[in-house]
Image (cartoon, rainbow, N blue to C red):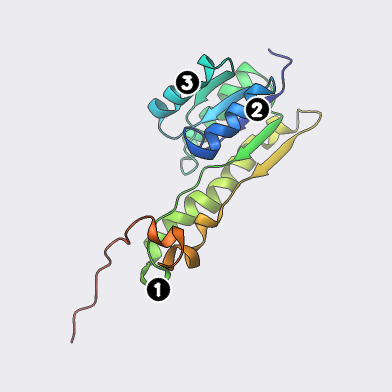
């Protein structure tokens, strides 16, 4: 087991998550780069290892209990504890608010809300073994249904809306 601080960042194979992994690795932490797609996670971790960071890919899908349990067991077996948990995994389905449906909302909440809860609950025992545990939940304005529905905002312009079925006239 290492004496370095141990961190896990979900949704970390690109963008902000990958940069957080880079920064924490640069501070001398051992970082688990979480990605639901193992292949993309491995590629991102390899990039950061080449930069000198102590990074390992792990594949918890925040919507899948079995993959979360596997990630907990992996870190528990290898490290024994977790110091920092950063919930960065998130999705954005670009559907105007007035055109979305329940399935879209359920899929969004499953990742962005319930996924965060699943991860925190699963990793809590490992965090409790740390003398200074930390949980950080990351979000952004790109998760705003209002902003993604407004074509006058950059979020509303960045991707076309998904076609939504229209009711047929009676």
Which mark's residue is nearer the viewer, 1 or 2? Answer: 2
Q: Is residue 4 above or below residue 162?
A: above
Label 2 to label 3: alpha-carbon separation: 15 Å
Q: Which of pointers 2 and 3 lies earlier in the amino acid sequence?
A: 2
Q: How crowded is mark 3: few (under 14 residues within 10 Å), some or many (20 or more)?
A: some
The part of the image, by quadrant, that contains residue 32 is top right
**Residue occupying image coordinates x 63% and y 29%:** 23
Q: Where is residue 2 in the image (x, y as percent from the top left)?
A: 69, 13
| Residue 47, numbered label | 3
Q: Mark 1 points at which residue?
A: 98
Q: Residue shown at 38%/67% (left/top)?
A: 100
Label 3–label 1 contact, CB within 8 A: no
Look at the numbered disc 1 and give the secondary structure of its residue.
helix
Question: What residue lies at 63% left-to-right and 38% top-to-bottom?
Answer: 86
Q: Earlier in the sequence, mark 3 or mark 1?
A: 3
State the quadrant of the C terminus: bottom left
Structural crowding at the residue carrying mark 2, measured as other residues with C-alpha within 10 Å and reported as few (<14), some (14–19) or many (≥20) = some
| Mark linked to residue 119 | none
Q: Are marks 1 and 2 in contact (CB under 8 Å)?
A: no
Looking at the rendered image, the quarter that the N terminus falls into is top right
Determine the residue positioned at 69% across, 40% down.
135
Q: In which quarter of the image is residue 119?
A: top right
């Amino acid at each position: 087991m290492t004496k370095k601080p141990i961190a896990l960042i979900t949704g970390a194979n690109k963008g902000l998550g990958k940069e957080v992994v880079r920064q924490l690795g640069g501070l001398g932490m051992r970082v688990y780069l979480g990605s639901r797609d193992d292949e993309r996670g491995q590629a991102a971790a390899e990039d950061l290892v080449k930069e000198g960071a102590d990074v390992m890919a792990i594949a918890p899908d925040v919507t899948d209990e079995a993959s979360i349990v596997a990630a907990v067991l992996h870190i528990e077996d290898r490290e024994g504890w977790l110091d920092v948990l950063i919930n960065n995994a998130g999705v954005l389905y670009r559907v105007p608010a007035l055109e979305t449906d329940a399935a879209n909302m359920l899929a969004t909440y499953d990742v962005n809300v319930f996924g965060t809860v699943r991860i925190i609950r699963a990793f809590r025992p490992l965090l409790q073994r740390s003398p200074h545990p930390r949980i950080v939940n990351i979000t952004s304005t790109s998760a705003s249904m209002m902003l993604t529905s407004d074509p006058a905002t950059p979020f509303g312009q960045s991707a076309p809306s998904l076609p939504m079925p229209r009711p047929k006239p009676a």
